[in-house]
Amino acid sequence: MSGNHRAQFIPARDSRNRRIPGLYTRGERYYAQLWVEVGNGKKAPRKFPLRDQDNRPVRNFSAAREALEIKRHERRENQLPTIGHKPRFSDYCATYFDKAKVQRKRPGTVAGEREALARWCDHLGHVRIDQVATPIISAFIDKRLKGGKFCGRRLAGISERTANLDLMRLRNVLKCAMDDGYIRELPRMKMLDEAPSPKRNLVTPAEFDRLIETAQSACDKNGKQLADYLRFLAFIGAREQEALHIKWADVDFERERVTIGANELTKNWESRNVEFNPQLGALLREMRSRRTPDCSWLFPSPQRGTRDEHARSFRESLKIARKAAGLEWVGFHDLRHYFCSVCVMAGIDFMTIAAWLGHKDGGILVGKVYGHLLDEHRSKAAKLVHFGLSVIQPASGRSGS
């Protein structure tokens, strides 16, 4: 037999030597032959490799018959994979990044995906997209945890959290491949158990006041503007960049509310309204009284000249202020947490707080992270309740007559 001779498809037979319609073998593997649409209203027979639930090739007769019936059901439900050549994983990654929904992601998010998927391509880029299976995924994650050579560089071992991020980025690509018809279902990718995050320190009202006071005294160039910005973050719960992109046109003094993300530059690309609380309203009215007339932004850039531009960042100024205040652990995001904690202790329902923050979970995350604050606040509040000077004595048992 010639060395170039390819193994032939042989009709499968049962123990009584009867042919099984639609079932073939080639080498040690089983295939289903099904008549499928090939375009122009025509049908033709096509062979599909049979795999088990772990995406491994079927190699025994009983499992092959079961897998054949599954393929027939997929044909009836129009769920068969796309007919034709399947791209390699590395080639499909290029297709993935050309998708409109991927290009709509933030540049930083796309850059992170490119970096992670480059490592995946280094490990399994040669594998066909429909043959990316659990064992090869697990081998990559094990190597990442231990540390090894990726893309020509030797990298140290990573945390379980980072490994899970790698898995999520791989899943994004495979979900797109499933939508495109290249794979029928995702391989099993079990997320790793992550170490609990360290408990975040919450800014106290006294610390917040100290930070604001120090910002004005320690930052000679923009101390007043930094203090306005820090108070604004704390009173509205906006993210750092969300606040910088707010215009005066987004502040409705008549309805007493601020629109965050009117330009859709938010984390979830959606705008949201936050109603004035007393301190937010007072701050905005005071800022309006000294607003620069030719600038449309709440926080104009100090270097804008005649241009109408917003400030890019207050990070360097914050470093100076928090060092002078002895609060070097405080970041802009801590003021978002400060807003949330104050709202929780004020008794505002979690769903309303979630809407102000831009969460889409109806308050589940707020309750998970800050629910204990509400319990502590209620317990302390209960101890402050007094009903007058009279003391209620415990009821005594009835005396005998």
Image (cartoon, rainbow, N blue to C red):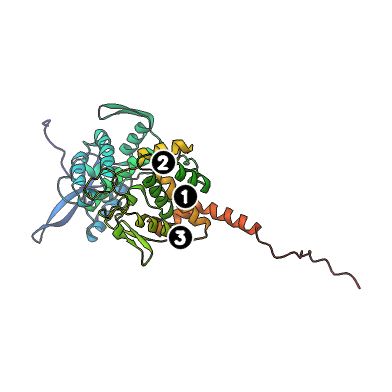
In this orientation, does residue 232 appear?
yes
Rounded to the nearest whole Å, what is the CA distance between mark 1 and mark 3? Answer: 16 Å
Please determine whether, in this image, residue 109 is positioned above or below residue 391: above
Dot 3: few (<14), some (14–19), or many (≥20) neighbours within 10 Å? few
The disc label shown at residue 338, or none: 1
The disc label shown at residue 71, or none: none
Residue at figure coordinates x 40%, y 59% from the top left: 355
Which sits earlier in the primary sequence, circle 3 or circle 2? 2
Q: Name the residue under label 2.
A: 192
Looking at numbered disc 2 in the image, what kind of residue is underneath it? Leu
The disc label shown at residue 278, or none: 3
Disc 2 secondary structure class: loop
Which sits earlier in the primary sequence, circle 1 or circle 3? 3
Disc 1 secondary structure class: helix
Image coordinates of residue 164 in percent, x first then y, are 37, 41
Residue situated in front as seen by the camera: 2 or 150: 150
Rounded to the nearest whole Å, what is the CA distance between mark 2 and mark 1? Answer: 31 Å
